Image (cartoon, helix red, strand yellow):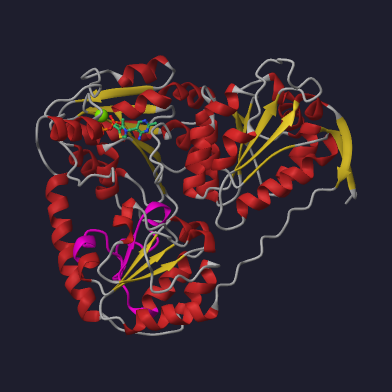
Amino acid sequence: MADSIEGHGGELALAMLRAYGVTEMFTLSGGHVFPLYDAAHKAGFPIFDVRHEQSAVFAAEAVAKLQRRPGLAVLTAGPGVTNGISGLTSAFFNASPVLVMGGRAPAFRWGSGSLQEIDHLPLVTPVTKYAATAADTASIPGEVSAALTAALTPHRGPAFLDVPLEVLFSSDDAAAPVANAIAPLEADPDDVAKAAALIAGAERPVIIAGSDVWAGGAVDALRAAAEALGVPVFTNGMGRGALPPGHPLAFAKARRPALSEADVVVVIGTPLDFRLGFGEFDAQVVHIVDAPSQRASHVSTAVSPAGDLVQILTALAQKNADHAEWIAGLRTAEDAGKARDAEAMAAETDPIKPARIYGELRKVLAEDAVTIGDGGDFVSYAGRYLEPARPGTWLDPGPYGCLGTGMGYAMGARVTYPDQQVCVLMGDGAAGFSLMDVESLVRQQLPVVIVVGNNGIWGLEKHPMQAMYGYDVAADLQPGLRYDDVVRALGGAGETVEKPGEIGAALDRAFAAHVPYLVNVLTDPADAYPRSSNLA
Ligand SMILES: Cc1ncc(C[n+]2csc(CCOP(=O)(O)OP(=O)(O)O)c2C)c(N)n1
Ligand SMILES: [Mg+2]
């Protein structure tokens, strides 16, 4: 292999991106980034383009989450970058290794008022692990490598690199690209030993496993640890499906009794945030994280091993314990919960309750289907009623809770899996953020199924506002709106469903279609997902 490469800034960047296993870019056109397109075009490197930059970043995030390698979004200077910031922030909260490469107004006349001239770094630095501007053409590959190394090093997250116009368009030579190896971080063995002793000695231990277990390739190690120590496992985020639904230690419905009765709660690869009651359990808490920065500062834990999750979980699996009685009790609660869910999912109500949609979906979703949630209540129901059979197949927006991930995540999922089912569960409100990108999916032959739970309201806001004030404002949408017609106009297909008995056949047609297909299910606006507040 040659020890140096030569080319314009786009070519030098692309060479290093490929060394890190990046295989496509997501973008929306802008002259500032043309050299990146030129490099990709000449190399036969796929370019997928979108109608709003947030979709490009969400698509890059989806490939990063699903494939556990860097995803790339290329955004033009100024508004291109600022439109991508919610996506970057979501990737930051989700620890997704996304690289956003930005164009940038020319450096040589900085301050003279060039088109789209703004310094991006103060805007993106708080939501990235690495943010820099390439100073000259020859330094571009090194900058790309540094950005990707930061993105891939646990705790993972997004990185940003912008390149001034004349720097990207100029040519130079640079060292042949070599990707840095990411060394595993070894946890303190005393912390691991203490955690193992606590779990083995517990009477009623519970494991909650989240996205970093998937991202860190620790799914098998999790299972080995859970089996050796005999601990029931609950999951969230990308950890869902880590234990197959039929596994004797896999639980989903018995969370309340499990967490209120447990004496040791082991939280692995997910923060002690609002999704877990902020970690305020009546139990000793073991928080296993992939980097010291992820240790919770707001609760005191019994021990918090920080390091490579495979190593930690493999070490835990060396100890054996048996909690058969505890597990049997939870299984009874789990089965009761499942029976309640089954009843809700079969409901024959008119108007349709969202639960019924999931009842029908469960009949048609394959084991390897990728399901994506973008919405309020409708997606909370997806979390309750859909049981991913495999890890790394469920994409939710994560704790940042940003609406609008739908079509971007769908694009990244379809690019990842050309032949598997990809199904977006969308609120009608959420649809407004990204539905125009159905055009991008149609044009680039990326068929997906979109199921809209159309209650005609911003449900997750309207119901709480009613409860708090006795009235609501800014919470209504057009009832019965034909989102399927929108998709049809953009070159896709779809239909509206009003009766519970019609959902199944509509889904069959949707999954058989070769274009994006939207099933617009009119649901009961009076239905509210039962929740205590997420606000505080
Ligand atoms: C970008 C963004 N804007 C606003 C919100 C606040 N928000 C959270 S859920 C929700 C309602 C979503 O409505 P819809 O998608 O129709 O789902 P539904 O609750 O009706 O099922 C809103 C507005 C948010 N999370 N993200
Ligand atoms: Mg709604």
Q: Is residue 231 magenta?
A: yes
Q: Is 349 on the left or on the right of 379, as rendered?
A: left
Residue 310: x %, y % from top left: 52, 69
**Camera-nearest residue between 514 and 463:** 463
Q: In this view, does 336 lie above or below 24?
A: below
Residue 463: x %, y % from top left: 17, 33
Residue farthest left in this picture: 349
**Camera-nearest residue between 11 and 104:** 104
Q: At x 72% / y 33%, what residue is drawn?
A: 44
* Residue 258 visible to the viewer: yes
Residue 381: x %, y % from top left: 24, 43
Q: Is residue 65 above or below residue 357?
A: below
Q: Is residue 437 magenta?
A: no
**Camera-nearest residue between 284 and 323:** 284
**Camera-nearest residue between 75 and 342:** 75
Residue 362: x %, y % from top left: 27, 46
* Quadrant of ligand 1 in image: top left
Q: Is 162 on the left or on the right of 137, as rendered?
A: left
- Image-quadrant location for residue 106: top right
* Residue 352 visible to the viewer: no
Q: At x 24% / y 61%, what residue is drawn?
A: 255
Which region is colored magenta?
228-257
Q: At x 36% / y 54%, what residue is drawn?
A: 273
- Image-quadrant location for residue 327: bottom left
Magenta segment, prevailing SS (helix, strand or loop): loop
Q: Is 81 on the left or on the right of 164, as rendered?
A: left
Tally the numbered discs.
Answer: 0
Q: At x 12% / y 53%, what residue is drawn?
A: 340
